[in-house]
Amino acid sequence: SCKLFFPDNPVKIIRAKGQYLYDEEGRRYLDCIGNVHHVGHCHPLVVQAASSQMEVLNTNTRFLHDHLLEYAQRLSHTLPEKLNVFYFVNSGSEANDLALRLARQYTQHEDVIVLDQYVRRAGGVFVADEVQVGLGRVGKHFWAFQLQGEDFTPDIVTMGKPIGNGHPLSCVATTQEIAEAFTATGVEYFNTFGGNPVSCAIGLAVLDVIEKEDLGGNATKVGSYLLGLLNELKNKHPIIGDVRGVGLFIGVDLVKDPEERTPATEEADYVVKRLKEEYICMSTDGPGSNVLKLKPPMCFNMEDAKFVAEKIDLILTGKVVTLHHCYHS
């Protein structure tokens, strides 16, 4: 991972809090990558929930436990009624792998396509991947699939490590009908650590923080402000071909030519490296690796948004002035 994101000069991070990372020299970085740390690095309520449960019982996957039942119930209250069966696993990759197994067994087909109207017309099931975009990240909706309309219900929903704030926890939610088809294969699905008491205690704490601190509302407010700032930069810098997103899930598309929209891959890589020098951690995405991707912890604030926009502007105009005093501890 170090080589993937910062191959020339990896950063050694020794602690973190909220939306900030600190290296061994005490320098503070603004984390625009850390969607996994959904409610903020080392949130005290999450840390306390983990510590308290680890003092009592850790792994307990063969027996009932109150946290497991309560967590499934809390998640079910955020989802459409028919999504009432939950499989707890340890990562978004595991969740999506299990979702494909469920879908293939239920439909008896192997192919995967991505447009819901064609999926259901062909007798398939719709899998909503909420690993990066769920839990209020899009703002006014708790799940991104709800952007399709309140009456839209996927057949399977996958969730990733953000539900555990970075602790290995993820989940697949599906219908009773699909779950029964999977069970009918006779192949038992077992996961040693999936749904253990510590993970579920952490998951419950994350839901509590999202609600108590109105992080969905924060995503709406700060995300709207940041989108506005970035669109102002789009009007100023021709290299910005598009700014898109909702809440605190935003992409800035860098292109060589506004007409041809040729991906500005090298330029995007340069911007990310320069941002790191300005104490901002960001990454690129997209087929051309030319999209600056912002998915910070949900406690990201207005000051952070302004700081990011200002630094991107300065980098694109070639006038970076490092304000060291701003991002030191």
Image (cartoon, rainbow, N blue to C red):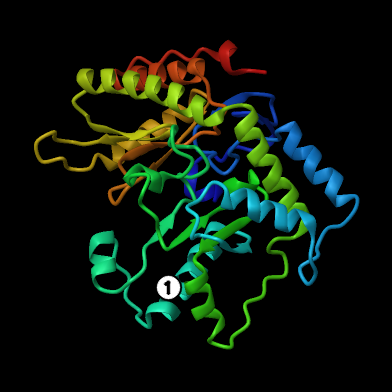
* Residue at image mark 1: 103
Residue 37, position as x, y percentages in the image = 60, 40
Which residue occupies the extreme right position in the image? Answer: 56
Residue 144 in sight: yes
In the picture shown, does residue 35 fall above or below 64?
above
Residue sitting at x 44%, y 80%: 105
Residue sitting at x 57%, y 44%: 36
Which residue occupies the extreme bottom position in the image? Answer: 186
- Dot 1, how many residues are within 10 Å of its Cα: few (below 14), some (14-19), or many (20+)? many
Residue type marked 1: Ala
Nearest the viewer among 192 and 184 is 184
Residue sitting at x 60%, y 56%: 170
Residue 224, position as x, y percentages in the image = 38, 23
Left or right of 88, for residue 52: right
Which residue occupies the extreme left position in the image? Answer: 259
Residue 126, position as x, y percentages in the image = 36, 63
Nearest the viewer among 157 and 114 is 157
On the rendered image, what quadrant is the C terminus found in? Answer: top right
Residue 294, position as x, y percentages in the image = 43, 34
Nearest the viewer among 97 and 71 is 71
Residue sitting at x 48%, y 64%: 96
Say which quarter of the image contains residue 205: top right
In the picture shown, does residue 108 fall above or below 237?
below
In the picture shown, does residue 328 fall above or below 87?
above
Residue 115 in sight: no
Left or right of 151, for residue 263: left
Q: Label 1: state its secondary structure.
A: helix
Say which quarter of the image contains residue 184: bottom right
Left or right of 248, for residue 58: right
